[in-house]
Amino acid sequence: MGKVSGVVLLVGLCLGAILAMLLVPSSRSEPSGVAVAASNAEAMTIEADPVESSTPSSSAAPGSPVPSKSADPGKPPATVDAAALADLVPGGQVSVVVYDRTAKKSTVSLKSERSYTSASLVKLLIALEALQAGTPSATVQRMLSVSDDDIASRLWTALGGPTIVTKWATRIGLGGTRPPEDPGRWGDTRITAADIAKIYRYLLEQVGAGTRATIMRALSGATENGSDGIRQYFGIPDGVGDLPWSIKQGWACCRGSRILHSSGVVGKDDRYIVVVLTSQPTSTTYPGAGRRVTELVKALVPALDPA
């Protein structure tokens, strides 16, 4: 009986201690350390401002506010508002083509099939015929680089006049190019911006290396003033900044309008063909009309960005 009473007493004491632990409240009013950490983590998740990473994640959603500092291969090419170009020549007519030889397409086109008087741009066709006929390279280069009208007239007469235009229009596929109505006036040949762009593509991609080198050397070495004293650096030379260029310009007046054209290739490896044709009011001076053509070319510069 003594042993049983001792055991019963011991068990009673243990149960009492346990009951006391359950009934007496804890002296700490704050939650445990683990609970505090969990509570703070939840608060940060809900309330903290999102932190933008300086390096965009490859899984970032489209439209992420963090731009990539490297070139974006999916970036659309720069665009030019072609319709707005006409406003730069008030009272006149404008046609424009920019052809990207790398992308193999026109990136800017405005009234590309409109017909204009060629002025000296027809000298590109005269040069092709002259070199094929064996004319010295130096003669052809001078005709092009200083836009020498006397040389052009001699070659035009000697090599068949209007047949030069019809022959090369057929060979290159110039649908809007026509000989002049007056066979003796080579500068009245009819052209379009689309056709002039085709002539440059032909020069750069199809003619023999010797012919191409002769003509392109002349165009890259065009002098600031033509043989008649007119400044011929309007348009492409004045408008494209530090980009390399090769040009053939055209100007004429005044059978109803003042004609100023700027055409050529721009950029590394002659990537861009640029053609700007204008017919402007005769009240406009050559310098004033030239400035308008330059503003047109400046407006095209975003389309000449290879990025």
Image (tube, helix red, strand yellow):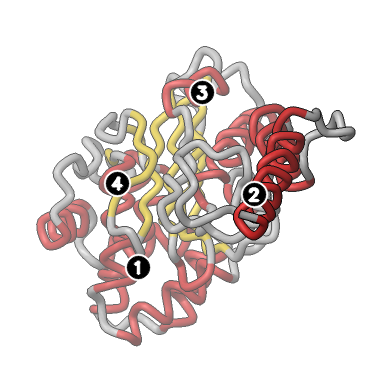
Say which label, 3 or 1, has the lower sequence index.
1
Q: Quadrant of the N terminus?
A: bottom right
Residue 240 picture location, percent across and down: 63, 51
Say which label, 2 or 1, has the lower sequence index.
2
The 10 Å Cα crowd at callout 3, few under 14, some 14 to 19, many 20 or more, is: many
Label 2 – label 1 distance at C-alpha: 121 Å
Q: Amino acid at mark 2?
A: Val
Which residue is identified by label 1?
Answer: 127
In the rendered structure, are the residues bearing label 3 and label 4 in contact, judged by CB atoms less than 8 Å apart? no
Q: Amino acid at mark 3?
A: Gln
Residue 142 picture location, percent across and down: 52, 71
Picture layout, residue 101 above or below residue 292? below
Which residue is identified by label 4?
Answer: 184
Label 3 – label 2 distance at C-alpha: 116 Å
Label 3 – label 4 distance at C-alpha: 24 Å
Q: Is residue 230 visible?
A: no
Picture layout, residue 266 above or below residue 84? below
Q: Residue at x 67, y 56 (%)?
A: 2
Which residue is identified by label 3?
Answer: 280
Which residue is identified by label 2?
Answer: 11
Q: Residue at x 42, y 45 (%)?
A: 76
Say which label, 3 or 4, has the lower sequence index.
4
Compared across the picture, whether 31 is left or right of 68 comes to right
Which one is nearer the viewer's eye here, 144 or 86? Answer: 86
Q: Nearer the viewer, mark 4 or mark 2?
A: 2
Label 1 – label 4 distance at C-alpha: 17 Å
Under tag 3, what secondary structure?
strand
